[in-house]
């Protein structure tokens, strides 16, 4: 794809579609210099840290039009991606960023639709072994409604 070809593709887009393209380009550029991947940039993923009172690692994401499905609610795959990313971030915070980890399994229960605003996840470490971590996450919206619950297992390797 050339720049001229891209410009031709953009010519018939409406203002909302151009805004979406702009957000995607900005996320792509941020991902070049950020420790976050492109999809995390598209989610506006945030990791405020550990909450002593909740005894959980807190993460946030913003529900945007680009992440919604045809029913105008957050796509279930994006909810699962947010949970998986929050759990992965929790593993890094618990075990250190020098070790790599991968998801072995992820079970998500979708309880209510997410429509707008910020979602907050609280992730707790249920079991921490030498190579296996078991985590649980709950996701709430700005009105503190429970959107989803999940459990996952992660494998750490050298």
Image (cartoon, grey):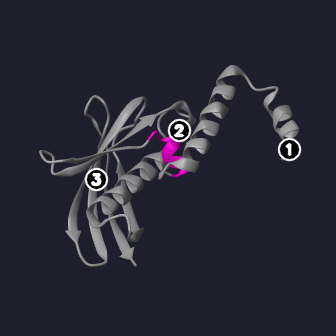
- Farthest residue in the front direction? 33
CA gap, disc 3 and disc 1: 43 Å
Q: Which residue is mark 3?
A: 137
- Looking at the rendering, the stretch of residues picked out in magenta corresponds to 37-44
The residue located at (43%, 52%) in the rendering is 80
Which of the two residues, 133 or 41, is positioned nearer the viewer here? Answer: 41
Answer yes or no: is residue 38 visible. no
Q: Are marks 2 and 1 in contact (CB under 8 Å)?
A: no
Q: Is residue 129 left or right of residue 55?
A: right
**For mark 1, what is the residue?**
2
Q: Earlier in the sequence, mark 2 or mark 1?
A: 1
Does residue 49 belong to the magenta stretch? Answer: no
Residue at 45% x, 52% y: name it. Answer: 81
Looking at marks 2 and 3 on the same chain, the residue that comes earlier in the sequence is marked by 2
Q: Residue 26 location in percent, x, y?
A: 60, 37
In the image, 4 versus 10, the foreground residue is 4
Q: Quadrant of residue 125?
A: bottom left
Q: Nearer the viewer, residue 33 or 88?
A: 33
Q: Position of residue 153 (x, y in %)?
A: 33, 68
Count every numbered label the image shows and give the total. Answer: 3
Q: Which residue is mark 2?
A: 67
Helix, strand or loop at label 2? It is: helix
Q: Is residue 16 left or right of residue 158?
A: right
């Amino acid at each position: 794809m050339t720049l001229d070809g891209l410009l031709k593709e953009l010519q018939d887009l409406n203002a909302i579609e151009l805004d979406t393209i702009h957000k995607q380009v900005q996320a792509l550029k941020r991902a070049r210099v950020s420790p976050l991947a492109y999809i995390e940039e598209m989610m506006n993923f945030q990791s405020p840290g550990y909450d002593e009172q909740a005894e959980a690692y807190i993460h946030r994401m913003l529900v945007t039009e680009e992440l919604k499905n045809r029913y105008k609610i957050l796509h279930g795959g994006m909810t699962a991606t947010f949970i998986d990313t929050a759990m992965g971030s929790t593993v890094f915070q618990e075990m250190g960023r020098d070790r790599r980890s991968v998801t072995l399994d992820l079970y998500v229960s979708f309880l209510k639709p997410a429509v707008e605003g910020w979602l907050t996840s609280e992730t707790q470490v249920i079991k921490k072994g030498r190579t296996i971590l078991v985590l649980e996450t709950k996701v709430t919206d700005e009105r503190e409604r429970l959107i989803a619950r999940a459990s996952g297992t992660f494998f750490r390797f050298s």
